[in-house]
Image (spheres, grey):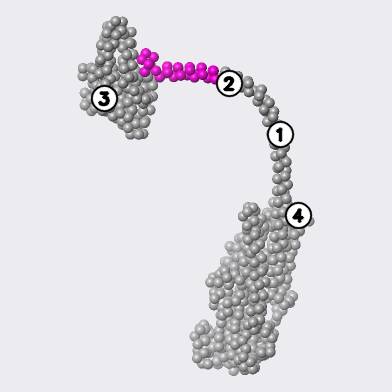
Amino acid sequence: MMNRYLQQLSQSHFSVIIGLFLLLISQSSWAETLSPTPLRLTSDSITKIELQDWVYANQNNDIETLSGLLQQPENTWKKLSTDQPYQIGIKNYWVSFSIFTPKDYLSRIIALDNPLLDSVKIYHLINGELVSTEIMGDTLPFKQRPLQSNIFLYPVNFEPGDTHTFYIKIDNKGSISLPLVLWSSNDLTQLTETKNLFSGMQIGLLLAICLFSLFIALASASYSYSYYCGYVLGLTILTATIHGVSFRYLWPQWPIVQQYIFIIIIPLTLGFSLMFTEKVLQLKYHNLKMLRICRIMAVISFGLTIIMPFMNYSSALYILAFVVLTISTILMAFSLIQAFSGQRNAPLYAIGRMGLMIGCIITGLIYLGLITVDLSPLIPIMIGLTFEVITMAAVLALRYNDERKAKFEFQKQTLEQAQKLRETREEALRNEAENSEKLEQMVQERTLELEITLRELNDVNQKLTEQNTIDSLTGVKNRSAFDRRLIAEGRISRRQQTPMSLLMLDIDKFKNINDQYGHLSGDHTIKTIANTLSEYVKRPTDLVSRFGGEEFAIILPCTDIEGALLVAEQIRQAISELVIVHNEHTIPVTVSIGISETIIDSDEHPMLLLEQADKALYQAKRGGRNKVCYYSLETEQI
């Protein structure tokens, strides 16, 4: 026994170790200070025993250790009253009870059916000797509970002649509800299964409504179903937390979530409820003042969701209780006002709100100790919540049905209007067809006249274009066409990085021809040379133009210096071999040609290329005429 005792000492806190030494010293005096009547347990006892009649509570809330508790006088203990008001937020709350087994070996489970307690420390004494210390609660991970259950369970094995004394220290920021029951394992399992069935049905119903609303919201893009989905989801999480399901299955390793989930989810759910109310009562169309009030209260609710975790938990609960009661009352009043004003969805909405409020009132009366019933104080509000959710679902269904009927009616009216429009359109088409037949002949006649006129205008435009770009004497391009073409080909050369060559050609001693044979002979000579140039410059992209007087300019795109020299030499030789006869006079003629070639790199470069060709032409003239010269640095220096 001493080894077992030392082993328990090693598992306890430092303060408990000190308490155990004091407990050994004060065991004899403790037997004299408090002798509560223990529960007598035999094999013939019922399998479910409510322990309230054997539970005593200590009135001093300043004791933190078992050793300090054992030094308290007997008058600090009082029998736990079943009809006392429930407290919110308490620390160092001690209760005790004893169980005596005279002759049987029994196995039982002590159940504390309140899954929302923050800390539960159970000190188990057998015949005055501490044998076990168990710590449970929402501040610890779920897996640390001795039995994995939504509620707090402590298994006990009883032997004949033993007296088991239990001291339970409770700390909780929420309400203190201590439904202590001694169960047989079989009956507890049956009850747990039944309880889990009903809580599962409730949670499943809420979750099914939530998912249905979500799908409807996604399919119809309806804000009403979106807000209702958020509202029901909040109620589902709240219900699962109250039953201990959330902590067990959703966040078993994060007890911090369990500590703050209520003060976060309640205002959040309230905010969605207000937004849902705004839509379902259609306050935007019926009462703008109520709409503004609902939106202000929704902002306050969502703001409380952020503020509440930073407040004292007990104060937060009182504030939430006041806010929930106030907003519920206001919404009830809004629904009644809208119902009496003839709003279709308001009566059913008011019934749902009334069911929730009745559940809240009954739960509040149980907590205040004003009524005593044999059920958990949370059951009325859970029933009220479920009733309200189902009623709101019915409200949404009625609204959806109204919207569907309105949609059908609108579609019917639309179809009727479309039919009228179709008939009107057909009549208009018939009239238009009749008018079209009359107008067609007029249009055809007018079109024929316009075509003739356009053809004549096109001919005139072509003649004008030719006059603007063709030299009237020679038939080749004039100086204006040359200037435009030079700029265009220069841009192509710059863009494609291809060489461009330019030829400047001048008739040698043309003034002597005019003086000796006459100006008409001179004009005939220029025309003959222009024809010869056109014969040797045949590519579509090449351009032959009369530059002025007896000068000609030739643009050779995509042509390097070798190609330009070849073309120029062919032209020079062909012209020198010409036999020009005019007025029975044979006119000898030669030409001098200057060439420049480069890849254009700027907008000004084409004009520079023209200057360089002119300098090469000047060099050919000075070199004796009837020559071809190309521009080079040496040409620039001459």
Label at residue 447: 2
Q: Marks 3/2: CA distance?
A: 55 Å
Q: Say which residue appears at 71% left-offset and 34% top-offset.
A: 424
Q: Say which residue appears at 70% left-offset and 55% top-offset.
A: 280
Q: Amino acid at mark 1?
A: Thr
Q: Which residue is mark 1?
A: 424
For marks 3 and 2 on the same chain, the one whose residue lies earlier in the sequence: 2
Q: Which residue is mark 4?
A: 344
Choose mark 4 or mark 1, whichever is in front: 1
Q: Say which residue appears at 67% left-offset and 57% top-offset.
A: 276
In the image: residue 273, left or right of residue 124 = right
Q: Marks 4/2: CA distance?
A: 67 Å
Q: Quick one: SS at disc 1?
A: helix
Q: Residues within 10 Å of mark 4 (few under 14, many from 20)?
A: some
Q: Amino acid at mark 2?
A: Thr
Magenta stretch in the rendered image: 451-476
Front in this rendered view, residue 305 or 189? 189
Label at residue 171: none
Front in this rendered view, residue 349 or 448? 448
Q: Marks 1/3: CA distance?
A: 78 Å
Question: Where is residue 94 drawn, in percent x and y?
Answer: 62, 82
Q: Marks 4/1: CA distance?
A: 39 Å
Q: Amino acid at mark 4?
A: Arg
Q: Residues within 10 Å of mark 3 (few under 14, many from 20)?
A: few
For marks 4 and 1 on the same chain, the one whose residue lies earlier in the sequence: 4
Q: Which residue is mark 3?
A: 566
